[in-house]
Amino acid sequence: MRRMAVFWGCTIPLRFPFLEQSTRLVLPALGIEPVDVPGFTCCPEPTLVKSVDEDVFYLTAARNLAVVEQTGLPLLTPCNGCYSTFKSVLADLTRDWRLRRALNLRLSAAGLEVRGDADVWHLVEWLSEDLGPVALGKRISKPFWGMRLAVHYGCHLLRPSPAVRWDSPTAPSKFEQLVRALGGTVVDYETKMQCCGNALDRMGDRSASLDLLRSKLADLAAQAVDALVVSCPSCFLQFDLNQATILREAMNAGIPVMYITELIALGFGLEPRTLGLGMHRVSVEPFLHKWESKLSQRAALSEYFDLGSLQVCAACRACDSDCPVARARPDFVPSRVLASLLSGDLDEILAGPEPWHCLDCMTCLERCHSRLGMAKVFEKLRRLAHERQTAPAVVRSSFENFLSTGTLGAGRTTARLKLGLPELPPNGLDSLRRILTQEKERP
């Protein structure tokens, strides 16, 4: 197991210990032994400290870095602000030897020296770049299948560049990849990279802070997300605690907020009570209830479909251009139907017309390089729709007619007589009925 020093920051241990709880529970399962290092102080927070006294800012950050350098351990932090401070100061120490020398002259009074070579990781960065989404996904026993999850990066998870350079500072994707690895459906939204506004609250402008929050929440609500996933305690404060303030005014349900390790811990099968999820100010109960329902739907869906093949098919989308119905009807997109299945919308699909738009022409199967094709999926959908009595009336009546006559239509014999064709021989209806009505042998 790899040992890593953890810098918890100020906000998590003092205001949100349940975020610490989920992180402490998750890390060992991912191969990390979290080490608590004595002697840390605030990172410090730049807006409240650097803006007032730059020397205090650099000396405090350098002292923390010197402390962790003495341990010889890499540093892991679950706080965006702490991460940005340390990465920024490390970049400055590397670039400016005079700054490093001046700081070390001051640090020597405490018997410390900062070399500037601390290996600093944000928790999400480590999950993405060291562990990897695939390895994370393999550890999940209860995936968030069918759950619509939005991601809020936060300003300081990716900025400032080039001090922070593990993902794009303006168009990132790696946090979303982690959420997808947990089985969730990632929902994009227009204000994804917009600041949550919590810093304004700290500066005393609560009204402006809540206005920014309302903008984000309105955007998320318009996308019908089930939860917002964050990686920063300050962002969590804004979206959970301050959202609760807004909810008291608006009297609506709100959007549950999940820190990334809370989501992972649930995916590992840990109980919400163990994680302290009841300490959230915006209730997570609607999220948990829907998630359990989706897991039941997933279990039911796996009885009829190979979910792995469905995922491959939905992601490929090559058949969308091959399907003759899709070309004739732009509103019918076969891969979108499969994606809806994977999102847990089986009942809605069976009640709709989509299963019956497939012509069973097998073009998709013949052109599929994996020999999967969508036709078999649509065939099963049609059969399920009939079993649940949601098939179109014309299909039901045709099937009943087949069972009663052995054909799909009696037709008139006038044209046959005019052509001098012989009478049709008796059909095999009685024999067929005997076969169909006998009990199936059990395998």
Image (cartoon, grey):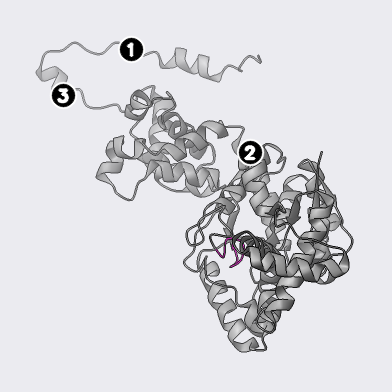
The residue at which mark 2 appears reads as 300
The residue at which mark 1 appears reads as 426
154 in magenta:
yes
Q: Which part of the image, by quadrant, shows the C terminus? A: top right
Q: Is residue 172 left or right of residue 415?
A: right
**Circle 1: is it few (<14), some (14-19), or many (20+) Cα within 10 Å?**
few
Q: Secondary structure at mark 1?
A: loop
Amino acid on which disc 1 is placed: Pro
Residue visible at 71% across and 38% down in the picture: 139
Q: Is residue 416 left or right of residue 233?
A: left
**Circle 2: is it few (<14), some (14-19), or many (20+) Cα within 10 Å?**
few
Q: Secondary structure at mark 3?
A: helix
Q: CA distance from mark 3 to mark 1?
A: 18 Å
Q: CA distance from mark 2 to mark 1?
A: 43 Å
Relative height, residue 443 to residue 15 (above, below):
above
Amino acid on which disc 2 is placed: Ala
Majority secondary structure of magenta residues? loop
Magenta extent = 152-160
Q: CA distance from mark 3 to mark 2?
A: 51 Å
Relative height, residue 80 to residue 332 (above, below):
below
Q: Is residue 188 left or right of residue 296?
A: left
Q: Which part of the image, by quadrant, shows the N terminus? A: top right
Spot occupied by residue 388 in the image (x, y as percentages of width and height)? 54, 41
The residue at which mark 3 appears reads as 414
- Res. 372 in view: yes
Which one is earlier in the sequence, the residue at label 3 or at label 1?
3
User: CB atoms at circles 3 and 1 under 8 Å apart?
Assistant: no
71 in magenta:
no
